[in-house]
């Protein structure tokens, strides 16, 4: 019971300051236990934030001020399950496979031999109305939780923007303040 409460508080704390960074100008706030560390994304300050907290699912979605959901950034945290990242990738890709007239899912990077296996891929969906959606997905399997980061574009995007976001997502990682092997950045408070 106490461990469950610590995990819940850690997850809550993680979600309240989800966007840490790995650069020198901003040190993330690190909580006891597992933490998701992402690059500093201060430019999202003007974006609309939608928070969803359910018993086994927590997410934050940032929507572009003018484009809304058509340009959004989503971070989701769920309790860890026994399945591997490929299993979850198949589940995440399934709606696109079923609803798009042309769907592709291309691996960018996949690591299974680390403490925190990652699956990084890009999906493209051509819809019946001729519009196109592109999503970058990063899935990290933690010891406590499963982390899914997405950058979503619908209709408007550039190759430069995709490349920039790919670089940002590649810098994301999981650390654990209780572990010597997966050290978290030091707070400078």
Image (cartoon, rainbow, N blue to C red):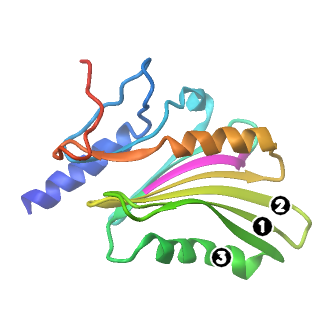
Residue for point 62% across, 73% down: 93
Q: Are marks 2 and 3 in contact (CB under 8 Å)?
A: no
* Left or right position of 136 against 74: right
Chain-order first, disc 2 or disc 3: 3
Mark 2 = which residue? Answer: 132
Residue extent of the magenta highlight? 68-76
Counting from the top left corner in percent of width and height, residue 49 is at 54, 41
Spatial CA distance of label 1 from label 2 is 6 Å
Mark 1 = which residue? Answer: 125
Kindly give the residue lying farthest to the right in the view shown. 130
Q: Quadrant location of residue 15?
A: top left
In the image, residue 27 sits, relative to residue 88, either above or below, namely: above
Say whether residue 49 is visible: no
Task: Check disc 2: other Cα within 10 Å, few if <14, some if 14-19, many if 20+.
Answer: some
Mark 3 = which residue? Answer: 95
Kindly give the residue lying farthest to the front in the view shown. 113
Q: Are marks 1 and 3 in contact (CB under 8 Å)?
A: no
Secondary element at tag 3: helix
Chain-order first, disc 1 or disc 3: 3
């Amino acid at each position: 019971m106490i461990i469950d409460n610590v995990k819940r508080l850690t997850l809550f704390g993680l979600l309240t300051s989800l966007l840490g960074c790995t650069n020198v100008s901003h040190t993330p706030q690190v909580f006891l236990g597992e933490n998701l560390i992402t690059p500093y994304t201060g430019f999202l300050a003007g974006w609309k934030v939608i928070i969803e907290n359910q018993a086994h699912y927590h997410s934050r979605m940032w929507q572009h001020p003018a484009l809304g959901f058509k340009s959004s950034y989503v971070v989701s945290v769920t309790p860890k399950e026994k399945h591997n990242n490929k299993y979850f990738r198949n589940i995440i890709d399934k709606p696109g496979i079923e609803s798009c007239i042309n769907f592709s899912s291309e691996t960018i990077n996949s690591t299974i031999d680390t403490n925190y296996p990652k699956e990084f891929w890009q999906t493209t969906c051509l819809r019946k109305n001729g519009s196109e959606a592109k999503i970058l997905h990063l899935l990290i399997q933690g010891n406590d939780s499963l982390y899914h980061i997405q950058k979503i574009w619908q209709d408007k995007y550039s190759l430069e923007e995709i490349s920039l976001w790919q670089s940002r997502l590649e810098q994301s990682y999981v650390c654990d303040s209780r572990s010597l092997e997966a050290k978290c950045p030091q707070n400078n408070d």
